[in-house]
Image (cartoon, rainbow, N blue to C red):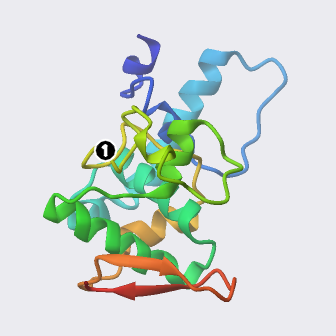
Amino acid sequence: TYCSTLGYNQYTIPALFIPNTYEFYWNTTPDAFLQRMKKESDRFWSSREAKLARCGLSREEVYTLASIVYEETKRTAEMPRVAGVYINRLRRGMPLQADPTVKYAVGDFSLRRVLHRHLEVDSPYNTYKNTGLPPGPVRMPSIRVIDAVLNYQHHDYMFFCAKSDFSGSHYFSRT
């Protein structure tokens, strides 16, 4: 109920928090803290409204997608390309098939390899079983990843796969 007064629900409430440095006094109440976070979030997104309109996603959707992109690659240069792959899949109505969402659904963030048995978990976060974005973020993404999603790369890639050299880079493919 409280989340809805801020414009969120129990799944999207993490999207209220923009990772940054904030100053608070020790006696700040939980309500004052959340109201401040709402104000900071609104300020953050107000400077990005045009980019939100161009990409066709809501604040919470961009935040959720950024959380997935951040788990897929730590390589800043690849983030807009990975975001473009997921946006292409969303626009075609394809399942995202994002391993980070399965790790979240399973509740094991230490998984190094997602196996077929993990793909069977029944959860709204399992993007192998459900099309579209999960109901909320799977982690708190950095501002640079949020901006990478807002500035996603326009291309016709539909797939990507980690390179076997353990560089953290990926191969991208149309088919």
Give the quadrant of residue 167.
Answer: bottom right
Looking at the image, which residue sits at the far top?
A: 1
User: Is 108 above or below relative to 148?
Assistant: above
The answer to whether 64 appears left or right of 17 in the picture is: left
The answer to whether 8 appears left or right of 49 in the picture is: right
Q: Inspect the image, locate mark 1, and give the three-letter code of the amino acid beneath it.
A: Lys
**Image x and y of residue 141, in percent:** 57, 55
User: Is 14 above or below relative to 48?
Assistant: above
Within 10 Å of the Cα at label 1, are there few (<14), some (14-19), or many (20+) other Cα atoms?
some
As helix, strand or loop, the secondary structure at mark 1 comes to loop
User: Is 28 above or below relative to 51?
Assistant: above
For image coordinates 44% across by 43% down, the residue present is: 42
The C terminus lies in quadrant = bottom left
Looking at the image, which residue sits at the far right?
A: 26
Looking at the image, which residue sits at the far front?
A: 117
**Image x and y of residue 93, in percent:** 16, 58
**Image x and y of residue 134, in percent:** 36, 42
For image coordinates 39% across by 70% down, the residue present is: 83
User: Is 49 above or below relative to 158?
Assistant: above
**Image x and y of residue 31, in percent:** 60, 16
Give the quadrant of residue 82.
Answer: bottom left
The N terminus lies in quadrant = top left
Residue bearing the label numbered 1 = 129
For image coordinates 58% across by 79% down, the residue present is: 76
Which one is nearer the viewer's eye here, 38 or 93? 93
The answer to whether 19 appears left or right of 162 in the picture is: right
